[in-house]
Amino acid sequence: MHDIADLERRGVVGAFVATVEFVDGADAQARALGAEPAAVFVEHPIQDRTDDEMRAIAEGAFEEILRSVTA
Amino acid sequence: MTTTRTVLDPTSELVPAGIPKVERPATIDGLRVGLLDITKPRGNVFLDRLQQLLEERGARVERFAKPTFTKPAPADLRYEISTKCDVVIEALAD
Amino acid sequence: MMAGVGTLLAVVKADCPTCTLVRPVLDRLDVEIVSEDDDAGLERSWHLGIDTVPTLIRLDDGGAEVERIVGWSREQWEAFTHVSPLGDELPPHRPGCGSKTQDPSLVDELRARFSGSVLRSRRVDLAELEDEHEAMFERGWTDGLPVVPPTEARVLRMLEGTTRAPDEVVALAPPDLVECTVEKVAVNAVMAGCRPEHLPVVLAAVEAACTSEFNMHGLLATTWFSGPLLIVDGPIAERIGMNSGINAMGQGNRANATIGRALQLTIRNVGGGKPGVVDRATLGWPGKYTFCFAERTDTNPWDTLAASRGVDGDAVTLFAAGGVQGVVDQLSRDPESLTRSFAACLRAVAHPKLVIAFDAVLVVSPEHARIYREAGWDRARLHAELAALLQVDGSDAVQGAGGIAEGLPAHLAGVTLPKFRDGGLLIAHAGGGAGLFSAIICGWASGDVGSSPVTVPIGT
């Protein structure tokens, strides 16, 4: 999240993707940074997923990711 | 108790307070999109598929990777991304 | 309750030997004890304006204060309370101690805590990891240079520099035409680095800038260079430490620097007039960060600029300034020759072939001013002589004349025109005592489509 906040400061449209496990952590970090970078959350866990499952997760999140970086 | 961390808004307050996000483009078609891999396992598969989907929509995708997910990206990398990309997506934190 | 005594209040604190001394006396009297050691008592003490403890206050039946005494004096207390004898086991008198509300390490916090509610601006909490200076930049609140973070304590302290109420509307700030209150000016004045005593000048400047004659909106939106120049007159200038002498238009003096800057920050932050968005100047100039100086009085051959424009005493004149042109004349010893130098240089304001459309300020420095003083030329004389020398022959000025496409419309070829419109040339006095240089400050489009200089009194 720090990276996206920094890149936004440099004028790059930014978003980050994390699993829902990360929601509270993201909240706390955003409050500490004073910035709320665009965030997209996907289902947890991901470590034990097959490649096909990972691709499906990417497809599932794609529209939301697009929305987070376009008007 | 008020602290030195609270300031008064000097503006007309017509817009919400807070750090404004960068203005979003109408579409990613034709834009340079950076994908920043935080290098946790499996993230690359996610990003590979994301890259395909973005390219189908007309984006020109470039891949970047952090040396470690435990720290913010090094300054050089952030600078590089800022010069090469209109949009950046960082993934995948768990 | 003793008849005729009203209600008695005693404000005390624990850490005060005199308060401890008079405790048995207070116990004997029918008096309400207000202790500065608890929050409610401290707040009450603040609002009562207590300097010294113990303070004994009499309130009438309506709760309004009638009178008060401070410290311990048997004679005084007996007369005040109509109770006698009082404290005859005590020494006859003993001075009090400083009230907690006067403790320098607490004053700002207390002011923010107890008077902070008068502030209406939105509070913005900076996040834990935000650097307080970066935070100002990131929110777009600066002019490119760092600003002082406007905390409640700082803004409240700034507001002590004016007698006006924080919620009083000073002007409608363009371009958004937002109500700009005294408080908002104070917030921006803090950011600019002003001291409280500078605030009245800033308030007057904001008021002047937002008039339709000055046309701040137009000034913001133009592609021309100009930004507001503030010329301050009156005893206030010296009192608040402004510079009218060496390097008067340059850097180094806090009052000059921050007062001009406060106006700019107020306009951009409250009015919304930011570069690139509303401000479209092609090149601009550094004077748009700040441009503010005071007229020098000791070497001034004339009345003040403000007085010549009908405003005596403390006053500020706003002028749409686009840049400074230095004028060298180290050889003229008589007013006629010097005036011809000035006229020759003034001819070039904006463009030698353009007339009437642009205003200017001629800042005559002390060494040049002496020539006029010794010759007995008053302001009117200098204006008249300049006007005579600045009659422009249309034939020289029309488009194409001199092989220059720019110029006046062709039909003016046979006409003689003044370089400046009536009232378009202002004459001011400032500068160090050494240097046979004066300055011409170019204006912007004059009159209805542009800006007219505006002079307003400076209040409190």
Image (cartoon, rainbow, N blue to C red):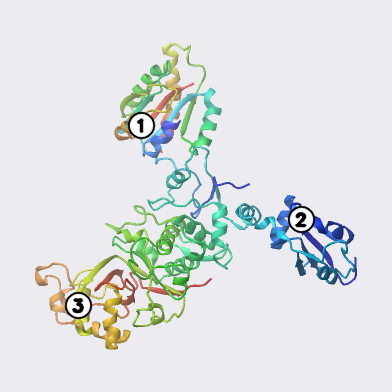
B10 to C427, vertically: above or below? above
Q: Are marks 2 and 3 on the same chain?
A: yes
Tell me the subunit letter for badge 2.
Answer: C
Residue A28, horizontal then vertical, whole percent: 54, 32
Task: Give me the disc on residue C17.
Answer: 2
Name the residue rendered at 41%, 12% in the picture. Answer: A51
Where, quadrant-wise, is the N terminus of chain A in this rendering?
top left
Q: Are marks 1 and 3 on the same chain?
A: no
Instruction: Kindly report the distance in space between the C-alpha atoms of the residues bearing marks 1 and 2.
Output: 61 Å
Q: Residues within 10 Å of mark 3 (few under 14, many from 20)?
A: some
Residue C241 in the image: x percent, y percent? 44, 67
* Amino acid beneath label 3: Ser
Q: Residues within 10 Å of mark 1 (few under 14, many from 20)?
A: few
- Residue A70 can be seen in this image: no
Q: In the rendered image, which residue does mark 1 sit on?
A: B75
From the image, tell me which residue sits under label 3: C341
- Tell me the kind of residue under disc 2: Pro
Tell me: residue A28, above or below residue C108.
above
- Left or right side of C301 for C64: right
The secondary structure type at the circle numbered 2 is: helix
Q: Earlier in the sequence, mark 2 or mark 3?
A: 2
